[in-house]
Amino acid sequence: MQKPRVLVIGGGAAGLSAAIAAARQGASATLLEAGPRAGRKILASGNGRCNLSNSSAGPLAYNHPEFVEPVLAAYPAQRIREFFSQMGLLTFADAEGRVYPVTNAAASVLEVLRLECARLGVVERCGFEVASISQPSDAVGFEVVASDGERLGADAVVVATGGGDSLLAVLGHQSVDCEPVLGPLKTAVEPIRGLSGVRVRCEASLRAKDGRVLATERGELLFREYGVSGIMVFDLSRFFEPGSVLSIDLFPDLQLRELEAMLVRRSEDLSWRAAETFFDGMLQSRMAEAVLRAALIEPPTPVAELSCEQLAGLLKRFELSVTGRGDAKQAQVTRGGLSVDEIDPHTMASRRVDGLFAAGEVLDIDGRCGGFNLHWAWASGILAGLNAAYFAEQRATARDTLSGGSE
Ligand SMILES: Cc1cc2nc3c(=O)[nH]c(=O)nc-3n(C[C@H](O)[C@H](O)[C@H](O)COP(=O)(O)OP(=O)(O)OC[C@H]3O[C@@H](n4cnc5c(N)ncnc54)[C@H](O)[C@@H]3O)c2cc1C
């Protein structure tokens, strides 16, 4: 009997894990990658350290919690770490649950994946850009055609082509419009003049036009020429709506009244200071300048003339109108892609076309910063590869029975 054939399109995290899972299940797995080598994005991830999972990977970290739930239940963080440890990769989780290789090098992650592919006999075809997938007949299975015209046949296909337009529209799959998320935000620039490069620990909320809180994050925020950046901003960017306002609380551990009382005491103790040095020792000087500017306080103003109520309000609610998402090239993931309505999250199988599977960022799934997106890629990739192999085996058996019968 000819081995069941699984073609995996896309040599990223999802495609590599799908090919490994399919080959471990006994399929003949071929990985088709358009670029010169597989795993390019893995090498760039986590600033070259590859934050490959998160101990608290749960449905609420993603945009379609109900869809990802069965996938995460089948492949929680511990199982993903085991998947890697079986291949010889040692990992650790930091205090925030972010899982990294102990080498702190993304290259180690790719190396173990490639070694496992080689051990299992996965055929890696780089420079193979798939232009179309068709299904000439149920018995034949799929035909995949490269942009240079080369054709390959398969019993099952896993599409793991990452963010952007998907190949599956031709097979009738619906797509949700794509937009880059997990990136910086552009804001009004006048209130942040002179702040570029300043980092503050704070709590920040993104509010919609009507005042609804869209999301709140705590952490380190980095001011840039054009707006704001940093992991907490990347997470907030997933909830951006036109007309949103970013409200930064520079003293999240103090209530407004406590902060105001503290400023009153400070203005008594430091009454000899001028306004421009009032915040010295409490705020970075460039941040202090921005707060005083927002309060329309011109130096030199004596401390006695400062309104502690107004300043406390500004420190708890330093507001910036958000004008859009920042440079798309800095965004880590794409929202949108293949609609999850047409995929079974228990198997990653298409509900439209038998034998077709999808995994990773090609689907309309995006998660928080912190290892959640790669976790999704591995988990959905393994599930898709495994089920593609089961399906391919059934199709290959049926084909053999048919050809045996006609002899
Ligand atoms: C700078 C950066 C840092 C990141 N850091 C982290 C991190 O630390 N932790 C984390 O969890 N996530 C991180 N992410 C997100 C994470 O890398 C992605 O979510 C994940 O890599 C998606 O994997 P994928 O396999 O679905 O897609 P991809 O990695 O995009 O792989 C898809 C592959 O398919 C190929 N392809 C596309 N079309 C075709 C075609 N027609 N034929 C053949 N091949 C095709 C592409 O060339 C590509 O190699 C980061 C992203 C970026 C950009």
Image: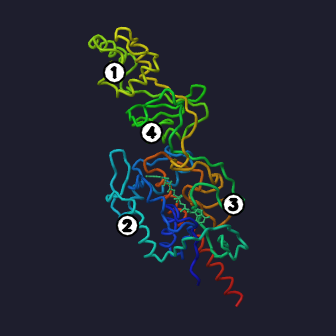
Residue 236 position in % (x across, y down)? 50, 38
Depth check: give the residue in front, 264 or 205. Answer: 264
Instruction: Between label 2 and label 1, give the one nearer the viewer.
Output: 1
Alpha carbon distance from label 4 to label 2? 33 Å
- Which element is circle 1 on? loop
Give me the disc on residue 352: 3
Q: Amino acid at mark 4?
A: Met
Circles 3 and 4: CB atoms closer than 8 Å: no
Alpha carbon distance from label 3 to label 4? 38 Å
Circles 4 and 1: CB atoms closer than 8 Å: no
Whichever of labels 3 and 2 marks the residue nearer the N terminus, that label is 2
The quadrant where residue 105 appears: bottom left
Residue receiving disc 1: 279
Q: Is the residue marked by circle 3 packed among few (<14), some (14-19), or many (20+) residues within 10 Å? A: few
Q: Is the residue marked by circle 2 packed among few (<14), some (14-19), or many (20+) residues within 10 Å? A: few
Instruction: Between label 4 and label 2, give the one nearer the viewer.
Output: 4
Alpha carbon distance from label 1 to label 3? 62 Å
Residue 111 position in % (x across, y down)? 40, 67
Q: Is residue 43 above or below residue 221?
A: below
Whichever of labels 4 and 1 marks the residue nearer the N terminus, that label is 4
Residue receiving disc 4: 232
Residue 371 position in % (x across, y down)? 43, 51
Give me the disc on residue 86: 2
Whichever of labels 4 and 2 marks the residue nearer the N terminus, that label is 2
Q: Amino acid at mark 2?
A: Gln
- Which element is circle 2 on? loop
Depth check: give the residue in front, 168 or 49. Answer: 49
**Protein image colouring:** rainbow
Q: Residue at x 36, y 55 (%)?
A: 100
